[in-house]
Image (cartoon, rainbow, N blue to C red):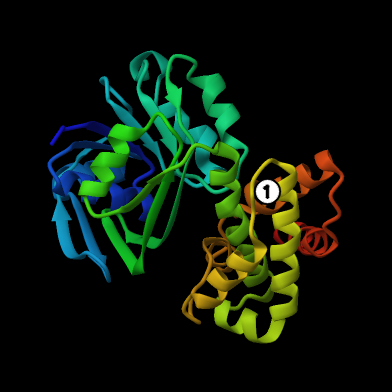
Amino acid sequence: METLRVAVLGPGGVGGLLAALLARDGHAVSCLARPGTAQHLDRAGLAVRSDRYGELTATVRGVERLDGPVDVLLVTTKATALDAALDRVPADVLGNAVVVPLLNGVEHLALLRERYPAASVVAGTIRVFASRPGPGVIRHEGQLAAVQLAPGAERLAAALDAAGVDVTVRPDEAGLLWDKLCFLAPMALLTTRTRQPLGAVREGHGEELTAVITEVAAVARAEGAASDPAATRDFAWSLPDGMRSSMERDAAEGNPTELEPIGGAVLRAADRHGVDVPVTRSIVEELRKRLG
């Protein structure tokens, strides 16, 4: 098996889980984080408790800034923290590495390609429910751990597959990004608006949830993605009742939310293409006023 040098920018729930799985499989993993977190990770590693992978501890290198060449940079910060986090990755040190952002939304690729012109920025998405209860501690709920990657990240795809992640490489960048947003935006917007988990949203606001799924799918089609709102609805109704979105959790805790990268991105794309999204627009505008 080929050993990769992997840097993970943002070792929270998503980044920490992937970092731990790759490190456990023998890859050289560095986690880029704030000083306190970096020191903790360098000393104690990552501790994962997962419904799918069990309990594991993985040794990683914790550093504040990228200080040497890597094969792959995984960008797994919150979209709200992306600009500040990228200061940890100097372009001259990163060089021609493969950069794979696993962020919510669709608007970050242009920013990364402008900032790292020598690198190969490859679109990617992940579906997983993982959180970071504390520094170096990762909780992975359920069995879902699915990554989709555009062409150009085949070495990373092979490494993740060997580490136990469900991986698909697909040729359509727009479809890859919008497929996730078609599910994520409706779920995040409705759980945040109602302050309820997914089961309560389905039971009390099912028609609204279905309407937003349909509207986002229409925007995705205008963007060149072959979206399937019926399949998205089936997936949304297959998940556990207690499922919460990270946006709802952030709003409840008073943290910055990803309303603009998720809901705002849908509205901006809808406006570009002249797609009418009245239900989605109403919810986003209500949340803009509420969340500030």
The answer to whether 36 appears left or right of 211 in the picture is left
Q: Is residue 118 above or below residue 292?
A: above
- From this viewpoint, is residue 41 visible? yes
Q: Quadrant of the C terminus?
A: bottom right
Q: Residue at the spot x=42%, y=19% of the render?
A: 119
Q: Is residue 237 left or right of residue 91?
A: right
Judging by the rendered image, the residue that carries numbered circle 1 is: 260
Place of residue 174 in the rendered image (x, y in percent of width and height, measured from the top left): 60, 40
Residue 197 seen anywhere in this rendered image of the structure: no
Indicate whether 139 appears above or below 224.
Answer: below
Counting from the top left corner in percent of width and height, residue 141 is at 35, 69
Q: Could you say which is closer to the camera, residue 254 or residue 127?
A: 127
Q: Please tell me which residue lies in front, 24 or 211.
A: 211
Where residue 53 appears, as percent x and y from the top left, is 22, 64
Q: Residues within 10 Å of mark 1 (few under 14, many from 20)?
A: some
Q: Quadrant of the N terminus?
A: top left
Q: Secondary structure at mark 1?
A: helix
- The kind of residue on which mark 1 rests is Glu
